[in-house]
Image (cartoon, grey):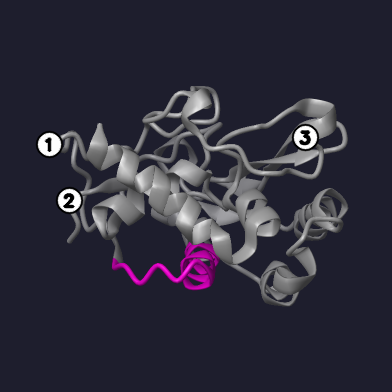
Amino acid sequence: MSSLLLSTSYLPPVEYFAIIMHNGGATIEVQETYPKQTYRNRCHIATSGGLLALTIPIVKTNGNHTRTSEAAVSYHLPWNRTHWRSLEAAYNTSPYFLYYRDILEPLYYLHYERLIDLNNRFLETMLDILKMQVPVTFSRSYTTHESGGTDFRFAIHPKRPACLYAASEFPRYTQVFDEQWGFLPNLSIVDLLFNMGPDAHAYLHQLAFKIIKD
C-alpha cells in the first residue's frame, strides 16, 4: 500500500496527478465518513462564463454515517448528459478535444452504483491517457493521521488554494478562454489534457520535479 493518502476525486485537479507522479502511486481513502463540498464529487473547468463546478449528485445510503465507499450516485437528474455537454461546450475548440472525446464520452453513459466506482473508472482512464503506470489502491481501514507529510486527503480542496504550489508556480499553458479570464491554474485534469494533449505528461513531470526540488 502506498504511503501517499488521497481522497477519491471526480476528474481531479492538476496537482492531484503531479503528487501521484512524484510519489509513484497512491492509496485512495474510501473508509472515511463521506464529507460534503469537496473534490470527491466535483471538478472545476473553464468556460465562457468563467469557472464552472461540475457536481455529481450523491445519495448517502446510511445518512450522516455513510462512508465514502458507500456513497451512491444519483441519476434522479441527467447530470451525466449535462456534464458531458458542459465539457463539449467548454473545450470543443481546444486542440485535443476531438482526439480524446471518443475515449471520455462513453464513460458518461455507463451506470455507476457507487461514487468510488465512477471516480476510479475516470482515474484509471486519465492515468492511462497520461501514460502514468503507477499503482493506485484503496484504503482497507480509516487512519486518523499519516506521518511523513503524505496525507493529502483534505489538503486538496475546492475552497482552498493549491496545497503545494502558489498560483504563480503553475506553468502557463494556452487555455480556451484565457483572453477573457486569464490563466486559471490547477483546474480539472481534463483542462490540461484537452489543451496540451500528449505534452500534459511533461507538464505534470515539471510540477512533480518541483516537489523534489523544494
The kind of residue tagged 3 is: Asp
The kind of residue tagged 1 is: Gly
State how far apart marks 3 and 1 are (Cα): 38 Å
On the image, numbered disc 2 is attached to which residue? 3
Q: Is disc 3 in contact with disc 1, using a CB cutoff of under 8 Å?
A: no
Quadrant (top left, top right, bottom left, bottom right) of the C terminus: top left
Q: Nearer the viewer, mark 3 or mark 1?
A: 3
Question: In percent of the image, x 50 and y 66: which residue is there?
Answer: 130
Residue in the foreground of this view, choosing between 22 and 64: 22
Question: In percent of the image, x 22 and y 58: which residue is there?
Answer: 140
Measured along the vertical axis of the image, is residue 73 above or below residue 42?
A: below
Q: Is disc 1 in contact with disc 2, using a CB cutoff of under 8 Å?
A: yes
Q: Residues within 10 Å of mark 2 (few under 14, many from 20)?
A: some
Residue in the foreground of this view, choosing between 115 and 1: 1
Q: Residues within 10 Å of mark 1 (few under 14, many from 20)?
A: few
Query: Where is residue 122 drawn, in percent x and y?
Result: 55, 64
Q: Main secondary structure of the magenta part?
A: helix
Q: Is residue 110 visible?
A: yes
Q: Is 110 placed left or right of 136 in the picture?
A: right
The kind of residue tagged 2 is: Ser
Question: In percent of the image, x 73 and y 73: which residue is there?
Answer: 99
Q: Is residue 178 magenta?
A: no
The label shown at residue 178 is 3
